Image (spheres, rainbow, N blue to C red):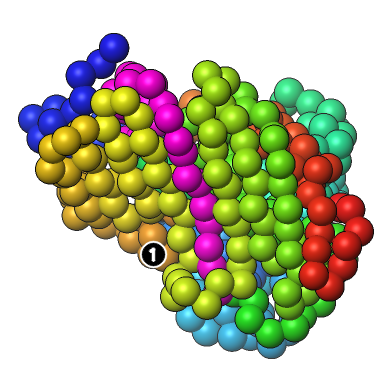
Amino acid sequence: MAKFPDSSSYEPMSSLFEEYKNRSKFSGTIAVVGFGKMGALHSTILKMLNQKNRVVVVDESKLVRTAGSRFLKGVGFYGAVDKMLAKESPDVAYVTTPASSHYDLVTSLAPSVESIFVEKPPTRDSAQLTRLIGQLGNRSINMVGLQKRFALPFRHLKQLVDAGAFGTLETIEASFESGDFLTETTRFSKLGRGCLLDVGIHTIDLISWIFGQVTVSTADARSIYTPLDDSVDAVLRERHGAVINLKVTWSSKNVRWPSARIRISGSEGAVDACEDSLLLTPRGKEGRFISKPDYYRDLTAVNLGDPEYTLEDMHFLSCITGGIAPETSLQACEATMKLIDEIYSVVQLGNKDSGRR
C-alpha cells in the first residue's frame, strides 16, 4: 500500500504540458458548429494555440454571426453546415450546439470530416451513443468535451487513488452543483433529460474514470423549475464496496459558480478535490492544501475560461497529430453514459412529476 503523500511527495504535473506541446503540431482548418458560450471559447483557444489554424464558424443566427465576426478577426462565418462544407474542407469539426442536436450533426459531418469533437453530453443516452460509434467506425479520431478530466486537481486525485494512498476507501462524496436554473424553463424538454445528463455527466465521468465500475443502489430526483430532473441524489458502490453518495443539481441557490467536487475518506486519511484545489489530510494530522497556482504554473499562455479547456483542446489536437484515440473518445465515454442510463432507470422523479425517466 502506498504511503499517504506528504509535502515532499508532490511533483508539479508539468509533464502533461510537455507531452501535449511535443505532440501538438496540428495546423489546419477547424469548423466550429454552434457559436454559443462553448463555441466562442473553443474558437478563441484554437486560434490562439496556433495562428496558422483557419477557424470557420457555423451558426444559424445572423445576429450571432455578425457579432462574432466583430471580435474574432480572420474567422469565416456560415449560416448552415452544408454551405460551409460546400466552400471549406475542414480537417476538424467541433460540435458545440444544444445536446439534442449532437447525434444528427455528428452523423452529417462524419462523411466529410475525419476528426470530430462534440461537447457533452455526446448523445441523449448510451444506445444512441453506440449507434453513433458504429456509424463513425474506426477511421475517425473523436472526442467528447468532458474537460473535468483535464483539471489537474482531479488528475492528481486519480493518481493518488490508483496508488492506494488513502488505504481502504470508506466513504466518497461526489457532487456537481450550479445555479443555472432558478426560474421555470422548458429549455431541455426536447432532450427529455435534465441535470443528471447535462451537468452531472462531469461528475459521473470522474467517478467512472477514477473508481472504475460502480453499481447503483438507489436514486431519487426532484423537479423544481423544469419538467425534468433538477436535482438528483443517488447512492452508488465502487467495486470494493465503498459507498459513493452522489448529488447533482443545476438549481442550487448556494453556489455562484458551477462546481464539481469529490471527497474521499479512507483508512489512511482523506482528500477533498475540486476544479481549483486539492486538500490532503492524513489521519490525525494537519492537511496540505494545493491550489490552482501550484498546478498551473507551467501552463501555456492561453488561459480562457479555465485552464482545463486549453488542456482539453491541446490533448485533442495532439491526438490528431499522433493518430491516437483521445482520453475522452466516444468509445471511452460508453461506460459513463451507461452509468447515467442506469441511474435514470431507478430514479423516481418526485415533486411536480412522479413518472419514471
The single residue placed furthest to the front in the displayed view is: 284
Q: Where residue 120 appears, x then y in whole percent? A: 65, 52
| Res 216 → quadrant | top right
**Residue extent of the magenta highlight:** 155-179
The single residue placed furthest to the right in the displayed view is: 355
Query: Compared with residue 159, is residue 175 higher up or lower down, i.e. above or below?
Result: below
Is 124 colored magenta in this rendering? no
Query: Compared with residue 119, is residue 244 higher up or lower down, i.e. above or below?
Result: above
Q: Where residue 338 appears, x then y in whole percent? A: 75, 34
* Type of the residue with mark 1: Leu
Dividing the image into 4 quarters, which one contains the N terminus?
top left
Q: Is residue 129 left or right of residue 14?
A: right
Q: Residue at x 16, y 35 (%)?
A: 284
Q: Residue at x 48, y 31 (%)?
A: 210
Q: Is residue 11 visible?
A: no
Q: Residue at x 39, y 60 (%)?
A: 306
The single residue placed furthest to the left in the displayed view is: 8
According to the picture, the residue beneath numbered tag 1 turns out to be 304
Q: Where residue 169 appears, x then y in whole percent? A: 41, 26
Q: Where residue 248 appears, x then y in whole percent? A: 60, 57
Is 170 colored magenta in this rendering? yes
Query: Compared with residue 95, is residue 37 higher up or lower down, i.e. above or below?
Result: below
* Along the viewing direction, whichever of 202 and 223 lies nearer the viewer: 223
Q: Is residue 268 visible?
A: yes
* Along the viewing direction, whichever of 248 and 147 lies nearer the viewer: 248
Q: Residues within 10 Å of mark 1 (few under 14, many from 20)?
A: few
Q: Residue at x 38, y 53 (%)?
A: 275
Secondary structure category for the residue under label 1? loop
